[in-house]
Image (cartoon, rainbow, N blue to C red):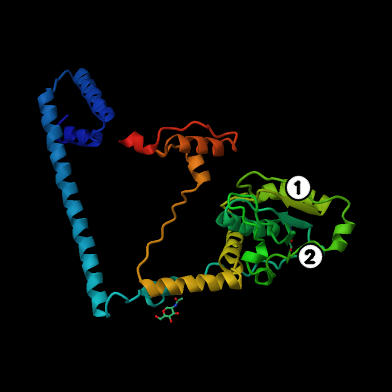
């Protein structure tokens, strides 16, 4: 083994964890035994030091180059934004050189067929969402896509009134329901409720079931569609994250149409939001958005103790007892682990 090879070998093994050093050690022993030409440890150490030196030389160089480039980039930006008239110059992405490559991705493709009408659909899909508003919004988005997969008529989803917030708002209090129905009319037929006439024709109340998390379209076709056809109405409960993430492009685009176009807040909520924005703009023009999510259920699920003494322990234990799978006792807190 010549010096070049030895250097290469030590460079390869030099990931500098104890395991790697041990590996290096055993490789040397193997070499020593097979070729009966011992290389002394001092030579090996010398080589390793040399290799380390080389590595630190290179990485040091790379790091300082990166520093230099990022510094230059920032300075250039500051310089140009000053030229353009100060701190307010916005970057207009639509006028950038790359803008010709941007396109809206939620429009349906030419082969996406129109929604089946209520009378020829496979039945009614009722949805009970679950969780906080954001989670429910995801549920609503998925509900539309599931209705599409099943050729079902979607009934406006029921919001969760029992989750942590105990908010008794209904869909129409939060979202513009007529806009929701009309803007998705070509994709999925949506109704506010099942008419009394149809209800009377049904022999049994809607079949209620819960599907596993992240179910695939095939699952819905195999397990839900037959029941839907037989019973004419199926209610899916606790509908949060019940549809797989990975769907074909057209269904993903439908998700975007629901989330970014069809779900619009009602006028009172939009007005309130606008007022808040105006008030904030009147105060200052720099804000930081923080989502602390420091609420009892989150604290319970974290399993940690946050230093609030016996009172905290008792209160957290009480919350944790609501979930049979949660241990009531605290794990050591993160802070006590690192300090
Ligand atoms: C839904 O309807 C389309 C035609 O509009 C048809 O091609 C598809 O097979 C139907 N799917 C189901 C599950 O009924
Ligand atoms: C913002 O300030 C302007 C005048 O400074 C005032 O007329 C307006 O009512 C304020 N808006 C809000 C929402 O506070």
- Please give the name of the residue rendered at 21% of the width and 24% of the height, measured from the top-left corner: 28
Q: Please state if 67 lies on the left or on the right of 304 as rendered.
A: left
Label 1 crowding class (10 Å Cα cut-off): few <14, some 14-19, many 20+? few
Label 2 crowding class (10 Å Cα cut-off): few <14, some 14-19, many 20+? some
Residue 182 point in image, percent of width and height: 68, 72
Report the Cα–Cα distance between label 1 and label 2: 20 Å
- Please give the name of the residue rendered at 60% of the width and 73% of the height, measured from the top-left corner: 267
Residue 198 point in image, percent of width and height: 86, 61
Secondary element at image label 2: helix
Nearer the observer, 192 or 323: 323
Q: Quadrant of ligand 2?
A: bottom left
Up-down relation of residue 170 to residue 208 (above or below): below
- Please give the name of the residue rendered at 50% of the width and 73% of the height, measured from the top-left corner: 274
Residue occupied by mark 1: 208
- Please give the name of the residue rendered at 21% of the width and 37% of the height, measured from the top-left corner: 11
Residue 36, image quadrant: top left
Is the C-beta of the residue carrying label 2 under 8 Å from the nearest atom of ligand 1? no
The earlier-in-sequence mark between 1 and 2 is 2
Residue 296 point in image, percent of width and height: 51, 45
Residue 257, image quadrant: bottom right
Residue occupied by mark 2: 118
Q: Please state if 108 lies on the left or on the right of 189 as rendered.
A: left
């Amino acid at each position: 083994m010549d010096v070049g090879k030895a250097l290469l070998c030590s460079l390869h093994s030099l990931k500098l964890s104890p395991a790697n050093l041990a590996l290096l050690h055993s490789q040397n022993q193997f070499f020593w035994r097979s070729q009966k030409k011992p290389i002394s440890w001092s030579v090996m150490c010398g080589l390793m030091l040399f290799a380390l030196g080389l590595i630190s030389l290179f990485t040091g160089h790379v790091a300082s180059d990166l520093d230099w480039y990022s510094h230059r980039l920032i300075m250039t930006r500051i310089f140009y934004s000053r030229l353009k008239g100060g701190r307010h110059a916005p970057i207009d992405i639509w006028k950038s050189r790359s803008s010709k490559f941007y396109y809206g991705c939620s429009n349906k493709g030419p082969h996406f067929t129109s929604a089946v009408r209520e009378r020829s659909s496979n039945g009614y899909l009722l949805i009970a969402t679950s969780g906080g508003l954001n989670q429910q919004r995801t549920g609503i988005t998925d509900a539309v896509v599931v209705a599409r997969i099943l050729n079902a008529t979607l009934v406006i989803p029921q919001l969760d009134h029992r989750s942590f917030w105990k908010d008794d708002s209904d869909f129409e209090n939060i979202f513009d329901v007529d806009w929701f129905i009309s803007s998705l009319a070509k994709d999925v037929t949506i109704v506010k409720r099942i008419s009394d006439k149809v209800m009377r024709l049904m022999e049994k109340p809607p079949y209620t079931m819960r599907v596993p998390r992240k179910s695939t379209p095939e699952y819905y076709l195999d397990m839900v569609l037959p029941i839907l056809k037989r019973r004419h109405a199926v209610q899916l409960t606790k509908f949060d994250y019940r549809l797989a993430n990975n769907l074909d492009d057209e269904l993903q685009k439908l998700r975007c149409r629901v989330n970014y176009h069809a779900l619009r807040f009602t006028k009172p909520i939009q007005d309130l939001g606008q007022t808040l924005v105006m008030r904030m703009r009147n105060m200052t023009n720099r804000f930081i958005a923080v989502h602390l999510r420091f609420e009892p259920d989150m604290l319970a699920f974290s399993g940690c103790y946050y230093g609030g003494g016996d009172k905290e322990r008792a209160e957290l234990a009480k919350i944790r007892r609501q979930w049979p799978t949660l241990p009531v006792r605290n794990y050591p807190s993160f802070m006590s682990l690192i300090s």
